[in-house]
Amino acid sequence: MSKKHVRKMLRKMASGEPVRLTVTMWSWEGLARLAFIAQQFGYEYADLQMSGDKFALFIVPDPSPQAQERAAQNRARYPDASDGGPLPPVVPEAIDLLKARMVVDSGSQYTDRLRMGLSVFVLTAFAAAIGFRLRADTAAVVIVGIVWATLMALLPLVLNFSRRYRAKYTAQLQAAGFTPVTDRSGRLRYVPPGGQLPGHGNPFSGGA
């Protein structure tokens, strides 16, 4: 987990407003650790969305008495957290559940049909880029055609793996008592036992 991202996030949280943190492609555990730290200082995880090679992590203030008490205690114990100082210790079980929520949330961003269309577009553009670098002669066209056909053949396998990967984490959330709900955009989300969607909906609607 990058200290730079932690400092940036904690400083944004000082405003008391919903926070959107954009980071270049990173590990699921690293993102879950960021959300966990936010939860130790009065915020809660709201959503995770993907855009190209970047993640957008959304967190919102948690007004619950437990969260506010925990935040006050941690601010007293870790006064230099936003300046790169010591941070509260992580709880592995909490990290695992945050990771599961992030995998499911990012996976529900697109339907399977749209995900297929986007993948075809990206892979076709990739093959075209190879052809451009190899110049437009007969050999290059053949090579590009082979590469494109290979990628298209592998695409259903990749998408199937992605579905199974999300299903694994969905099962983990269900086993932990999380409840499926549909947000304002029609996405299927999971909320903690007895909870609701963080921020009572999407405070970033139109800005995500």
Image (cartoon, rainbow, N blue to C red):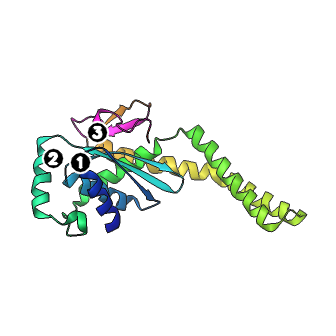
- Residue at the extreme bottom: 85
* For residue 26, side relative to residue 135 (left or right): left
Check disc 3 and report its element: helix, strand or loop: helix
User: Alpha carbon of mark 1 to alpha carbon of mark 3: how far?
Assistant: 10 Å
Q: Is mark 1 on a helix, strand or loop?
A: strand
- On the image, numbered disc 1 is attached to which residue? 43
In the image, what residue type sits under mark 1? Tyr
* Neighbour tally class for label 2: few under 14, some 14-19, many 20 plus, Cα within 10 Å: some
Q: Which residue is drawn at 15% across and 52% down?
A: 71
> Is residue 152 highlighted in magenta?
no
Q: Give the range drawn in magenta.
A: 186-206
Q: Residue 180 carries which label?
A: none
Q: Residue 174: x and y, percent?
A: 31, 41
Q: What element carries label 2?
A: helix
Residue at point 31%, 51% (across, down): 98
Q: Is residue 1 visible?
A: no
Q: Which residue is drawn at 84% across and 61% down?
A: 142
Q: Taking 83 as reference, is 143 left or right?
A: right
| Circle on res. 67 | 2
Whole-Å distance between the Cαs marked 1 and 2? 8 Å
Image quarter of the C terminus: top left
From the image, state whether disc 1 or disc 3 is nearer to you.
1
Give the residue number, with chain letter if any, for mark 3. 198
